[in-house]
Amino acid sequence: MAHLNLKHLRYFWSVASHGSIARAAEILHLTPQTISGQLRELEEQVGAKLFTKSGRGLALTDTGRLVFSYADEMFRIGDELQDVLAGRTPGGGLTLNVGVAMVVPKLLTHRVLAPALAMDEPVRLQCVERPLTELLADLSVHKLDLVLTDSPLNPALNIRAYNHPLGETPSVFCAARSLAARLRPGFPQSLDGAPMLMPSSHSALRRVLDQWLDGLDVKPQVVAEIEDRALMKTFGEAGAGVFSVPQAVEDDVLQKYDVEIIGRTDEVTERFYAISAERRIKHPAVSAITETARSGLFSPRRQVPAPTRPQAVEAGG
């Protein structure tokens, strides 16, 4: 048998991965006729059919499944190698391209990414902040090394990426001094009717907050829904309403903003994730980020009174 044509094998792998010639053609920016012709040539090289018709789609034959198992491992390893090499600059340093979902607090983002800048090897960090769907699209075509978000990747999305849980943290509720002093007694029931700043509806935290408040039969007055958590704190500092922050960055918030704590609860827990195109993390800066977050940033810092009701709910879970 002649040596297999790797280009033909790549086209076959794409068709098998995406389930149709039309979808593979769209991704590879080729015509379906071109891919069909390349598949016929590959079948001639292999000496057997690789696909059989199944309804409106294609199904792998026994030989096709065998070829796909080898091709899948080969191309996945090749893609991982590209990811690792792409993280190194010509001068020998590292580049780290990070996408940050808008719902992730800025202070937390800084604490999560700081270990990358503390490495012995120089790292050039490039950060962008956009809606999660846009960031995941960039991750899928290797424009980003990492995406930080408050919820795991939805399996329904046709994106080959992997969740790396960073940790979880209880919530702390803050407000401007006069409002905090008024609401501190009787927390959390004191939030009933109080002005409150809430994250947007696509935030995992918003769903958890709504469920927690409903369980307490507490109905605050939602005065604003703000996706940018830094902007939310600015409104809160001006006295617009109560807002929540992750306990992991509580001290940073109190130092940066003129606000006070109303109360804490472990019934509202935020989770944070790093999403990468790598199943096994190879990028040294990404390894530093994930390891430091798990061992330090999200470790328990203070005891929170045991919850009464409702049961604990975890954002991003």
Image: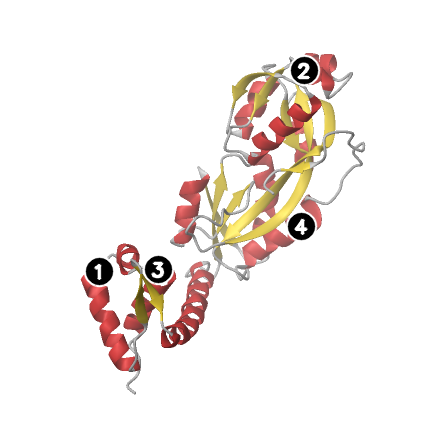
Q: Nearer the viewer, mark 2 or mark 3?
A: 3
Query: In which quadrant of the rendered view does residue 190 lie?
Result: top right
Residue type at the position of mark 4: Arg
Marks 2/3: CA distance?
52 Å
Marks 3/4: CA distance?
37 Å
Image position of 221 (left or right of 94):
right
Q: Which residue is mark 2?
A: 192
Q: Which residue is mark 1?
A: 32
Q: Residue at x 22, y 66 (%)?
A: 36
Q: Residue at x 57, y 24 (%)?
A: 198
Q: Is residue 134 above or below residue 22?
A: above
Marks 1/3: CA distance?
13 Å
Q: Is residue 118 visible?
A: no
- Helix, strand or loop for disc 4: helix
Marks 4/1: CA distance?
46 Å
Query: In which quadrant of the rendered view does residue 215 lie?
Result: top right
Q: Which residue is mark 4?
A: 294
Q: Nearer the viewer, mark 4 or mark 1?
A: 1
Image position of 240 (left or right of 127):
right
Q: Earlier in the sequence, mark 2 or mark 1?
A: 1
Residue type at the position of mark 3: Gly
At label 3, counting other C-alpha atoms closer than 10 Å, the crowd grade (few under 14, some 14-19, many 20 or more) is some
Q: Nearer the viewer, mark 3 or mark 4?
A: 3
State the quadrant of the C terminus. top right
Q: Earlier in the sequence, mark 1 or mark 3?
A: 3
Residue type at the position of mark 1: Pro
